[in-house]
């Protein structure tokens, strides 16, 4: 059988899982045609997950091929919500006469901290 390895029987664990009977039958037929057993397929999946443990997208793509489309829809929905909030903020800030400064116009936290320490040292001197 292609890609199979012999493992020590004493070091193996049995897994039980529930699967749709029609899916199992179809999957078993494909695996048999390709020369694999269901156990070899599960071992291959587990090996893939371990080998790609730092690549959640790759694992997700194997386990849920349509999840990327759902994830993309969710990301698009959140991006639209953020854009809407920014628009509402800009409109409200304009109505209240609040300056429309960007992050680039604002001092960094490091500069604010240094200014605070400087003012504190001047008061204590």
Image: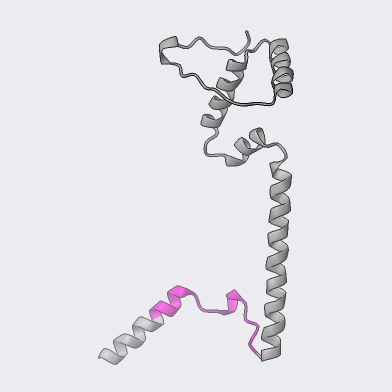
Count of numbered labels shown in the rendering: 0
- How far across and down, in percent of the image, does residue 66 sit? 73, 40
* Above or below, 113 relative to 77: below
Residue 27 position, x and y percent, is 71, 19
**Quarter assignment of residue 12:** top left
Front position in the image: 102 or 73: 73
Q: Residue 41 location, x and y as percent? A: 61, 19
**Quarter placement of the N terminus:** top right
Quadrant of the rendered image containing residue 21? top right
Q: Residue at x 32, y 86 (%)?
A: 120
Q: How is the image coloured?
A: one colour
User: What quarter of the picture does the C terminus occupy?
Assistant: bottom left
In this view, 100 is above or below 27? below
Residue 102 magenta-drawn? yes
Between residues 101 and 24, which one lies in front from this camera angle?
24
Q: Look at the image and give the residue range highlighted in magenta.
A: 98-114
Write the residue at 54% across / 26% down. 46
Most distant residue in the left direction: 125
Q: Residue at x 58, y 25 (%)?
A: 17
User: Whole-percent x and y of residue 94?
Assistant: 70, 87
Queried whether the magenta region covers residue 116, the answer comes back as: no
Q: Quadrant of residue 65?
A: top right
Which residue occupies 73% across, 64% down?
A: 80
């Amino acid at each position: 059988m292609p890609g199979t390895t012999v493992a020590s029987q004493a070091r193996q664990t049995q897994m039980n899982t529930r699967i749709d009977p029609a899916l199992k039958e179809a999957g078993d037929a494909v695996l048999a045609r390709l020369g694999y057993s269901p156990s070899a397929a599960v071992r291959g999946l587990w090996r893939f997950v371990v080998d790609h443990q730092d690549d959640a997208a790759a694992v997700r793509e194997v386990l849920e091929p349509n999840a990327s489309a759902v994830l993309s829809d969710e990301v698009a929905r959140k991006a639209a919500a953020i854009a809407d909030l920014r628009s509402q903020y800009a409109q409200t800030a304009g109505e209240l006469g609040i300056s429309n400064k960007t992050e680039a116009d604002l001092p960094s936290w490091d500069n604010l901290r240094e200014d605070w320490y400087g003012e504190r040292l001047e008061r204590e001197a």
